[in-house]
Image: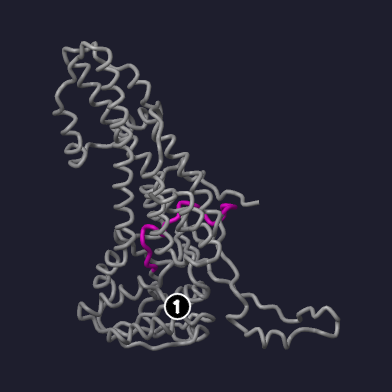
Amino acid sequence: MPDVNALVNDFVTNLKKRKIEGSKSTAKITAELLRTFISHQRLPNTNQAGALIEAVKVAGEQLIAANPVELAVGNIVRRVLHIIREEDVSLTSAAIGGMSLAAGSDDEDNWDNEDHAELSAASVAAAAARSSLRPPSLQTLLEDVPHLTAAPHTSSSGGDSESKSRSADKSSRIRKLKHNVIEAVNELILDITTCHEQIAEQAVELIHQNEVILTLGSSQTVLEFLCAAKEKKRSFRVFVAEGAPRYQGHELAKELVARGLQTTVITDSAVFAMISRVNMVIVGAHVVMANGGVVAPVGMNMVALAAQRHAVPFVVLAGIHKLCPLYPHNPEILLNELRSPSELLDFGEFSDCLDFGSGAGSPLLHVVNPTFDYVPPTLVSLFITDTGGHNPSYMYRLIADYYSADDLEVRPRSTS
């Protein structure tokens, strides 16, 4: 059996050393780690969901603090917490339904008062609110069938058998909660893995014949999106801004050419000069904030401003795992980080700019190399996600479907 704490510590170390980068890979590894963490948790007989939520929060705070700029880590931690709450409410609703069935039976004296006490007031209230506010769906009705058709519990004459039955019920309830949560996390991992395919399926509806598409840097989601349109016999041309100083646009351009797309590489400074020839800008994102703002590779805000100036649609592709329930003004949010100056200047060239006349060798030249830009929602025309296309003003409602308000309190744990 794996040492869960060792796995968490290794992941934290890799995040701190920037050995794991990119929203998709970070989100997937985080979900897999939390799945392992949950499967090895020993839960008490009472308030299992509360204990599991607390354990995941403690581990999640460590993960978030390891690299605050990788906001996908916090997204997945909060998604998993939301899953636990949802499963707890679902099981509580089923238990309430079973109790109501038992109350209507002839054996009313067989109610287990101890089981009643185990149902948290919050879960009961949430289940009741959900039942009253939401119309029953077909899936809900089908899920409730086993409970409605279950055979009524018959009384046992021996106290020992009743005690064993209660203990077995508690153990079964714990296993049921963990099993449901792990199954839901498995679905989350599958969604993260296949988000490119889900987004690419919408390419043929967005890209038309003989259009010119502009993108910046390198994004696997954008690559699959453009290639999906090419496979649907769309003929179009792609302008790729090179994305200095890392020049990831060169890599994207090579991959596009290898797949048969007409591609032109331009410098980042040429974006404004070329934007008048462009029909649409299609880019990826590092993360999407709750207000519809986008954290993206550096230079993206310049592209968005150029697109707005020439009335060119600015489309952002983002998987659901990139939707962050926090706002840019939240104090714990880190929207940028500085990379090594060596990406702009070699250390040998940098040393030539030192002032050795002062004795201390203090530099006259400073190099600032930010990683990300922030694009406000007013510059975004459309978001394409796993679930379809959405306006920036709709993003907060979409985010509300995947996160609980209580889980927004998860903060990075201080490492000092």
Q: Position of residue 63 (x, y in %)?
A: 51, 53
Q: Position of residue 397 (x, y in %)?
A: 38, 50
The relative height of residue 122 versus residue 86 in the rendered view (above or below) is: above
Residue at the image position 53 percent from the left and 51 percent from the top: 62
In the rendering, at what x and y percent does residue 166 appear?
29, 22
Report whether 85 appears left or right of 111: right
**Residue positioned 48% across, 61% down in the render:** 293
Work out whether residue 158 or residue 398 is closer to the camera in this orientation and state it: 158
Residue 337, given in percent of the width and then of the height, sits at: 58, 66
Who is closer to the viewer here, 380 or 138? 138
**The quadrant where residue 155 appears:** top left
Residue drawn at 28 percent across, 26 percent down:
96
Place residue 154 in its image quadrant.
top left
Q: Which residue is mark 1?
A: 217
Does 184 sit above or below residue 111? below
Tell whether 219 sits left or right of 65.
left
Q: Amino acid at mark 1?
A: Gly
Please indicate, yes or no, whether residue 165 appears anywhere in the rendered image: yes
Left or right of 47 in this view: 128? left
Q: Does 328 lie within the magenta span?
A: yes
Q: Is residue 56 magenta?
A: no
The magenta span reads 316-332
Q: Main secondary structure of the magenta part?
A: loop
Q: How is the image coloured?
A: one colour
Report how many numbered discs are placed on residues in the image: 1
